[in-house]
Image: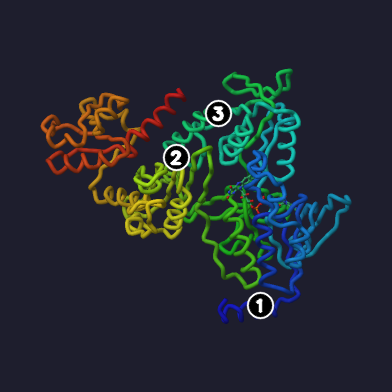
Amino acid sequence: MSLKMYALIMSFVLQIDSMKYVIIGAVAGGASAAARLRRLDEKAEIVIFEKGEYISYANCGLPYYIGNVITDRNKLFVQTASAFQQRFNIDVRVRSEVVSIDAVEKVIKVYNHNSGDTYLETYDKLVLAPGAEPIRPPLPGIELDGIFTLRNVNDTDYIKSYVSQKSVKRAIIIGAGFIGLEMAENLHDLDLKVSIIEMGNQILAPIDYPLASMVQGHIRDKGVDLRLNEAVVGFEKSDEGLLVQLKSGIVLATDVVILSIGVRPDTRLALSAGLTLGSMKGILVNEFLQTSDPSIYAVGDAIEFDNPITNKSMITYLAGPANKQGRICANNIVLGNQYVYHGAINTAIVKVFDLTVATAGMASKHLHSANIEHIVSTTHHGSHAGYYPGSQQMSIQIVFSPSNGQLYGAQIVGYDGVDKRIDILSSFIQRKSSIYELVEFEHAYAPPYSSAKDPVNMAGFVAENVLMDRLRLFYWDQLATISNEAILIDVRRADEFAKGKIGKAINIPIDELRSRISEIPKDKEIYIYCEAGLRGYLAQRILLQNGYDSVQNLSGGYHLWQAVTNEVALLK
Ligand code: FAD
């Protein structure tokens, strides 16, 4: 720390040595805020309330504990209440639920779940970190035994003991979001027969349809019964077990149901304090994470702030932002409002069996809804040099501005190295960089780790070609609308073509294109594809420089088209 910063901190500490900070919620955002408050202000009285039994535990590890990937339950606890209390000199009160806030008197009411007593506690500054609550729709039979949501350690203990003690063989996961898919994988790995019911036409709502399609195929290949466009309308108990009734009329029997249809910000306390909520029903905070009451700050899943790309309201349900907000909010409380929270771009990653799926920034579909013009480009490249063993393909979709190339979003599906690439892309998106910076991005390269041109560079090269009009793209969903007169050329090898092609495509392998160019009429629209996009691009360059005006190359190639059309066919 610089001397200047130290002096600044000390001056504030001296002014406010009698401050009392109260934090509600003691997991990701709350525990981070509390620890940072103490690091900045040794003299303050700090009290943290947690209605559950545990503090600062690893929510994100819970599905893996259920699946026996994490075998030691103690490993879930990053901190215990007593260790936290001792290390930070913070008064930690577990099983203590804050039931209301009087923001005028600066007093909270606390219910002690051990003693049954209710008492009042004052504060000078209050931090709200109550998180989100899982949605449990009021469906008939929703209260039946064996229907669970997963949010905390208690839920985890219930699910784990239910699955082992009742010799559970079948599970239905409702909702194919991040937690739903993690649970599907973990229960499948416990040898349960798993079905996933998803109301939307795809899994993982933050991901665009084409990339989600690739993952859906993988889930099916693992033997999971994935049902899309299907809603649950009720539950019943029978001799066969739990019956899950679907809107289509189908009834599925199971032993356990995991409801993972989403969460909503827990704003009950905020409402009791008369705080302003945003349009998405989260606690509205300013750039300093301060609510409409200057003495109350809020962090984590419960807050609403502006998306830095669209400038529209958003709520982020992720651990990284919650932790970082905890730190920023504590800085602002102790040092005065000077640390700006710039918003989250929803950088997230999930393991889905052998695949890794990651996203940062905006999906194309969400840019559409926000009326933001953009170009989509999908590329496939090896995780590292192809000649070094173990290279596996990853598919990267980026979305960017057609006018200045600003990178709005990135999504990746692959195996090895997805985490590294999404973090790089996230950093570019966060800094509002353009695709030209992906082109210049310098990475560490040796064959086991990457190629001389990293997949991130390659995504940038392709995007640059598009912006420079050296590459003209068309997309899988435009194939159905191209004119009958148009010529569709598959430039893959003959053996690849023989295994499957798109519609009425003719095959002119790229290496024969120059010698067979006279077979291609100049007055027709030409559509080209190859497996991944690269050979199609080469073909397009040859044709455009030989006087062909209307030549377009399929983004993502046959590889992407096949994954998407397989899924579209299944939906029908
Ligand atoms: P929480 O961490 O939920 O903490 C809120 C706490 O406040 C709770 O313990 C609650 O009991 C307490 N509380 C609420 N009301 C009161 C009250 N009135 N009085 C006292 N205490 C109260 N995110 C990722 O980024 N990556 C992942 O891999 C990931 N996996 C996840 C897996 C699971 C199963 C779950 C449930 C979440 C996962 N998340 C993941 C999301 C992440 O855990 C949350 O975004 C993060 O914990 C939010 O932090 P928070 O502090 O806002 O809320």
Q: The residue under label 2 is which amino acid type?
A: Asp
Mark 2 to mark 1 CA distance (whole Å): 47 Å
Work out which quarter of the rendered image holds the C terminus and state it: top left
| Residue tagged 3 | 224
Residues at marks 2 and 1 touching, judged by CB atoms closer than 8 Å: no
Q: Residue at x 57, y 50 (%)?
A: 315
- Answer yes or no: is residue 413 visible: yes
Which is nearer the N-term, disc 2 or disc 1? 1
Q: Residue 387: x, y in percent? A: 34, 45
Q: Residue 76: x, y in percent? A: 68, 50
Q: Which mark is residue 208?
A: 2
Q: Which mark is residue 12?
A: 1
Which is nearer the N-term, disc 1 or disc 3? 1
Q: The residue under label 1 is which amino acid type?
A: Phe
Q: Judge from the rendering whether residue 268 lies leftward or rightward of residue 203; answer left or right.
A: right
Mark 1 to mark 3 CA distance (whole Å): 57 Å
Which is nearer the N-term, disc 3 or disc 2? 2
Type of colouring: rainbow
Seen in the picture, residue 102 relative to 280 is either above or below; the reply is below
Camera-near label (3 vs 2) is: 3
* SS of the residue under disc 3: loop
* SS of the residue under disc 2: loop
Q: Residue 212: x, y in percent? A: 46, 37
Q: The residue under label 3 is which amino acid type?
A: Val
